[in-house]
Image: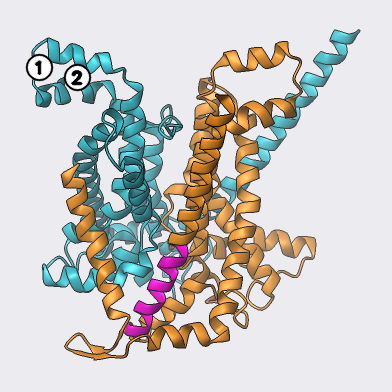
Amino acid sequence: MGSQDMSRRNTARSLLILLAFLALAAFILLPFAQTLIVSFTSTLPRDGIPEGRFSLVNYLNVIRSPALTSSILNSFLYVMMNVALCLTVALPAAYAFARYAFVGDRHFFFMLLTFRITPPVVLSLPIFVLFAQFNLVNSPIGIALVHCLFNIPIAIWILESFIAAVPTEFDEMAYLDGHSWLSFFFRHLIPAIAPGIGVSAFFCFIFSWVEVVFARILTVTAGKPITMAINALFSFRTDIGLVMAMTVISLLPGLGMIYFVRNYISRGFIIKA
Amino acid sequence: MLPAVAVLLFVGIVPLVTVFNYSFFDIFSLQQLNWVGVQWYRDILSTERFYDALARSVVFSAIVLCVQIPLGVGIALILPRGGWRQSVALMLLAAPLVVPSNMIPIMWLNLISPAGLAGRTFAWLGIAFDYKFNAIHTWLVLVIMDTWHWLGLVVVLAYSGLSGIQPAFYQAAAIDGASRFQIFRHIELPKIGGVLSMALLLRFVDSFMIYTEAFRINAGGPNGATTFLSLDLGEDIQGFNYGMAAARSMIYFLMILIVAWSFKTTMDGRKKLQTVNRA
């Protein structure tokens, strides 16, 4: 009887958890659903298409507008450059953190954290002045560089925990086999921590993709990213359907990235106690 | 190590020093700087407006943390372990993280507009929802929107901490006949302390300096009820009041730094205490 009671309580419990998850899913998906619906609706009076009906016109308008399509390219360009740059400089740094204890390493870690938590608004003005002197305004290189401010610390943090999980014998074995440091790095270490690189790339990608404060201040006349292109769509008579179609497009790369790292996404944040 | 330091020096330290320098000048243009000393700091710190905005930001961060941290940990605890269900749940939770921050208010405004899904539900339920003129409703929208956006990060961090706990700990607890709460209090909470403190810190600074979302929803209204610290800074920059903006930036940066620093010292202190207790 006791075990029957127990199993009934277990079913009730898993049912409750299921319900909680359904509610959570509804909460998360609701704004997405709204966006998707509006993006497929004609929201301005047009010839031939009744207002408020299902239509592909918004997506067609995106393709027809050179400003919008080029903004998608601009975003991709600086985000990719940022991810490449962050990984290149963060890998050696993360290796150093994971393998060597040096004076002040804890403080250095805190300093890295400080960069991540500095609000972009605080630095936006001098960044603009500084980058104008180096001719980096309106260029994807400028945005890619400035996004390193918060992405390098994140990348080092994630990569460090993945490298720390690789036993030290692994390194020593490779050196005994006569590998130089460089060839060990590329042939052995990088394949061993590939999931970690994937997860860091994912977080660098999304943080750079969603950032707007620096992206706005560094693109005055050209090189507008997708987020600013959407801002520019707002006017006295905003075509909200077009805005939503662009929003949906802007979500696709990030959602694709989530799919690729889905099995590793939660593995990167173990902090050395 | 050196390349990372070089890049961060260029995009972090140099601008920070520049802001510090600007904050002592009245700036007409970059060629015309007038030394005003600590005038800006005195101006900002002597107005009531600053303390009101500070209070609002502190309250907002407090609400956000009180909602998101327990909720995130709770979800991480009941999240399915392994298999496709875990992937689906994590993917779902991470989805709002990839929405650009200026699109989030657009999506939510659309949702709660009279023609949107939520707006129509409110009308159907007979709720008079007015985020433009009712301060409580504006706050509700901001808190719910922020939770929607960032809950996934808290869950992912907490979950990564939980999945690092070896099964042996749970077995030992089962042998001792520990209750579910005891397991949480004495095994899970200490083990996820590290990542959780990180989540706490990240959520604190981002909510404390919330700008794009708050500005878009109601531009600090109604009647200044959602004018947070960052909105005042945005106003200075838009008004080309750069000297004052720089001074304000420095004040905000120092506040964040002090919180982060005291946070780190308490964490280190607790860690030391634990090692002492164990020895």
Q: Is residue B230 left or right of residue A30?
A: left
* SS category of the residue bearing label 1: loop
Is B268 drawn above or below residue B120 in the view shown?
above
Magenta residue check for A165: no
Q: Magenta part of the protein: which range?
A: B243-256
Residue at 46% of width from left, 57% of height from top?
A: A39
What's the colour of chain B in the image? orange
Please tell me how crowded label 2 is: few (under 14), some (14-19), or many (20+) other residues with Cα within 10 Å.
Answer: some
Residue B70 in view (yes/no)? yes
Q: How is the image coloured?
A: by chain
* SS category of the residue bearing label 2: helix
Give me the C-alpha separation between circle 2 and circle 1: 10 Å
Kindly indicate whether the residue at mark 1 contacts the one at mark 2 (C-beta within 8 angstroms).
Answer: yes
What's the colour of chain A in the image? cyan
Q: Amino acid at mark 1?
A: His
Magenta residue check for B252: yes
Is A164 drawn above or below residue B57 in the view shown?
above
Q: Magenta stretch mostly in which secondary structure?
A: helix
Is A133 drawn above or below residue A63 in the view shown?
below
Which numbered tag is attached to residue A194?
Answer: none
* Quadrant hosting residue A181: top left
Q: Mark 2 vs mark 1: tell me if same chain.
A: yes
Label 2 lies in what chain? Answer: A
The residue closer to the viewer here, B109 or B32, is B32
Please tell me how crowded label 1 is: few (under 14), some (14-19), or many (20+) other residues with Cα within 10 Å.
Answer: some
Residue at 32% of width from left, 83% of height from top?
A: B242
Q: Which of disc 1 and disc 2 is earlier in sequence?
A: 1
Which numbered tag is attached to residue A179?
Answer: 1
Q: Which residue is mark 2?
A: A188
The residue closer to the viewer here, A136 or A150, is A150
Q: Residue furthest right?
A: A1
